[in-house]
Amino acid sequence: MTVNRLLINLITEQLTASAAFYTRYFDFEIDFDSDWFVHLISKEKSLEIGLIHPNSEIVPKEVAMKPGGYYLTLVIEDVDSLYEQVQADGVEVLQEPHDTFYGQRRLLIEDLNGVVIDVSSPMR
């Protein structure tokens, strides 16, 4: 089967604050905004994140609890610049930028919902 689209839905009671986080630090824009769901799309329209309230009737009951066992990876141009920005804003930094054995410069941060985000940049 051909996959035509991938949308990650993050369950959160903090829709507005979560949307602000992803639009501030990454190139997402709000495509749809309601009291139960916010659709974020990257400026080039190729990446999507959904923010959905846990009380929404469309959230499967099996996943309505706090998420676990995964992390998001977002590849950007300059991890170090983002690090300076999130540090100044008081974002939870789990691991400062460091060079990896596989050729990436990596930063681990946490969004306000507890989602761990691996932010990486190719090393030059």
Image (spheres, rainbow, N blue to C red):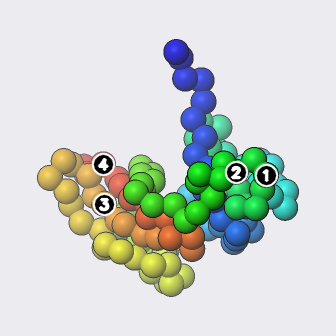
Measured Cα–Cα span from mark 4 to mark 2: 36 Å
Residue 124, percent from left and from top: 24, 49
**Could you tell me how far apart the alpha carbons at marks 3 and 2 are, in whole angstroms?**
32 Å
Say whether residue 25 is visible. Answer: no
Q: How many marks?
A: 4
Q: Earlier in the sequence, mark 4 or mark 2?
A: 2
Q: Is residue 45 visible?
A: yes
Q: Are marks 2 and 1 in contact (CB under 8 Å)?
A: yes
Q: Is residue 3 left or right of residue 64?
A: left
**Residue at image x 19%, y 56%?**
100
Residue where numbered disc 2 is placed: 59
Could you give the CA–CA distance between mark 2 and mark 1, rounded to whole angstroms?
6 Å
Q: Nearer the viewer, mark 4 or mark 1?
A: 1
The CA span between labels 1 and 3 is: 37 Å
**Residue displayed at 56% across by 58% down:** 26
As helix, strand or loop, the secondary structure at mark 3 comes to: strand
At horizontal 34% and vertical 65% (from top left) the residue drawn is 107
Q: Which mark is residue 49?
A: none
Which of discs 1 and 3 lies nearer the camera? The answer is: 1
For label 3, count other residues whose C-alpha is less than 10 Å away and answer few (under 14), some (14-19) or many (20+). Answer: many
Which label belongs to residue 122? Answer: 4
Q: Could you tell which of marks 4 and 1 lies nearer the N-terminus?
A: 1
The amino acid sitting under disc 3 is Arg
Residue 82: give x, y in percent of width and height: 45, 67
Give the residue type at disc 2: Val
Label 1 packing within 10 angstroms: few (<14), some (14-19), many (20+): few
